[in-house]
Amino acid sequence: MRCVAFMRNVNQGQRGHPSTSDIVAGFADAGCPGVQTFQSNGTILFDSDEPASVVEQAADAVAARSGHAREILWIPLSELGAVVDEHGGTPEPRRFEFTLHSGTRIDPHDARVASLAAEYRCSIVDAGQRWALVRNEVEGEGHATPVLENLTGKRATSRGLPTLIRLVARFGS
């Protein structure tokens, strides 16, 4: 299965962050040679029949190689492609963030969810298993990660919708 992984808080090539070679080698150590990185923000494409196991092993291997531990969350590329197909045509894609998290499914219509998101000047417009699509009130602002971390009590990481549109256009779904 083709999957997309998001490493949390990564700026490849910067001091204090895993390098691209550390990430690629870490996934190879986890049994996934031939991964592809996308941009320099810790977005990785990989193929596996056991993605959860690969990601867990890759996180350990990247930390061992680089000295910088980072959480890695993943989603099947086909599921990400379905989100882009449904929401990629929005007239304001820079207001949207796609967030992966390791908590339970979020109900965007739940009053507590809507209230918390509103405190952060955003709204959750769609959600699935371990992901949510967030619309920020102001273009270019990023509130999805703290909202999802607050709601789930777990770590989360986000990518802007324009990034995902480019990723799906390049690699298909």
Image (cartoon, grey):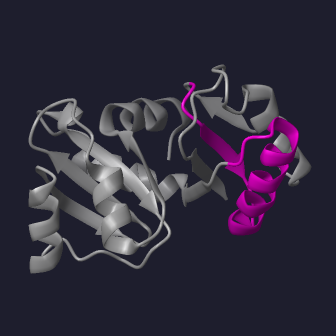
In the shown orientation, is residue 103 left or right of residue 73? left
Image label count: 0
- Location of residue 165 by image quarter: top left
Does residue 4 show up magenta in the picture? no
Residue at figure coordinates x 16%, y 61% from the top left: 117
Image position, residue 46 (x, y; %)? 70, 47
**Vertical placement of residue 151 versus 21, above or below:** below
- Location of residue 94 by image quarter: top left
Camera-side residue: 46 or 54?
54
Does residue 45 show up magenta in the picture? yes
Residue at figure coordinates x 75%, y 37% from the top left: 23
Residue at figure coordinates x 25%, y 47% from the top left: 143
Q: Is residue 146 visible?
A: yes
Image position, residue 69 (x, y; %)? 71, 48
Camera-side residue: 77 or 111?
111
Image position, residue 35 (x, y; %)? 75, 39
Camera-side residue: 159 or 173?
159
Q: Is residue 27 visible?
A: no
Image position, residue 101 (x, y; %)? 45, 63
The residue range painted magenta reads 40-69
**Vertical placement of residue 115 versus 65, above or below:** below
Quadrant location, the N terminus: bottom right
**Vertical placement of residue 166 versus 145, above or below:** above
